[in-house]
Image: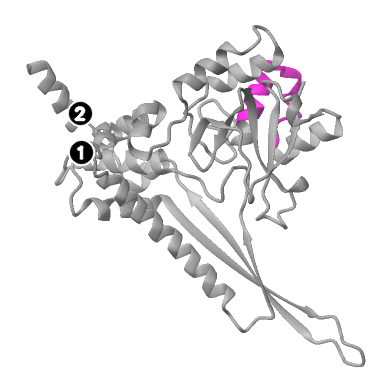
Amino acid sequence: MVTAFASVTSVIRSPTGVFYADEADGSAPLRAVMERVDKRYEDGKRKRIENYLGRSDFDSIKIEYGYEDGDSDAVNNWYDVISVYAVDAIMRKENPHDVMTVTDSTEAEMSHIHGLMNSVSYTESVTEHKGVPTEGEEPVSVRELKVSVREKKLEAMEAADLMGFDEEQRLVLKEMTDKRDNELIGRLTGMYFADRKDYIDIVSGLEPDGRGSLIVKAALTKLGCPYVLGAKGERRFDCSGLVYYAVGDAVPVLKSVFYTNAAGQARYLFEHGKLVSRSELMPGDLVFWRNRRCTGCGRWNEIHHVGIYAGNGKVIEASSSRGCVVIRELWSKKSYPVFMYGRPY
């Protein structure tokens, strides 16, 4: 009995207790807080864009989003936000509180930290040019407004600077974010980065020494690593960074040509005749997605996402929408359709 009580007490007094906050009565109060904070953030972006589009002092208005490599418009950094909130709440010098209980102040604290770690910038530029003249008339001036929308998402350790964390707080925060636990993430967000059955099925279906198998095995070692735009290892990746790491680990000669973004990797396979069909997919092949919402980003065929086919209809990918490296069903949707498949070796 003493051991059980000590175990419960240690969870309550630990920042990781935040991942159990929704389990007391099944009402999921902390997840509801997250959803409300997210909604206000997204509503703010939507209203700002609607205000731009509703302006009548321009002949045309173009909204340009800052799409990079990823499977969504923005990076999900909720694990980092929650970790910063928990460390601050438990370890602050004044008025610390446990994080397994959701109180009236929880939403205000969470919203404040989310605001520090998630921001949107809007850069306006105005151009004026002569329009196409109608017959017999002089061309008229056309004023165009272009708005560049860029989102900034901070990692936990970046937020530690803004929060003024001391050395002890930083150490605990680093441990929480470096050792991401699949079960803890799933408890609060409902999104697991790997199902045990999927993992076993993938590994058991691999050829022992095939190059494709080596690519998959390398990627599997990075499950749960956080998604960070532009990162290529060892513990942080974006989608093309994970492919660079896994392909380079299995086929070192390709490291130099795969040190690029998803579009560059796809173009290399296309130009070197390394495409395969859906029916020909084997573990270690690459899957590329086009972003249909980005019509002027200048990417080769507007490819913005890549994953590694793992067999059994699964892909391993560094997912911006889920915030880490995950195993998922091979997917395709209207805004992000699969564009092509390729075999890098």
Report whether 145 appears left or right of 269: left
Between 185 and 339, the one lying in front of the other is: 339
Q: How is the image coloured?
A: one colour
Residue 176 higher or lower than 68, as above or below: above
Q: Residue at x 20, y 28 (%)?
A: 11
Q: Residue at x 72, y 48 (%)?
A: 302
Residue reaching furthest to the top: 208
Would residue 250 be seen by someone viewing this image from the given angle?
yes
Q: Amino acid at mark 1?
A: Met
Between 48 and 167, the one lying in front of the other is: 48
Q: Position of residue 295 (x, y in %)?
A: 71, 57
Residue reaching furthest to the bottom: 136
| Quarter of the image that includes the C terminus | top right
- Which contiguous range is marked in magenta? 242-261
Report the residue marked by disc 2.
11
Residue reaching furthest to the right: 136
| Quarter of the image that includes the N terminus | top left
Residue reaching furthest to the front: 279
Would residue 261 be seen by someone viewing this image from the given angle?
no
User: Is tag 2's residue or tag 1's residue first in the polypeptide sequence?
Assistant: 2
Residue 344 higher or lower than 38, as above or below: above
Q: Amino acid at mark 2?
A: Val
Answer whether labels 2 and 1 touch (C-beta < 8 Å): yes
Report the residue marked by disc 1.
100
Q: Position of residue 228 (x, y in %)?
A: 53, 38
Q: Residue 253 colored magenta?
A: yes
Between 156 and 9, the one lying in front of the other is: 9
Q: Position of residue 234 (x, y in %)?
A: 54, 25
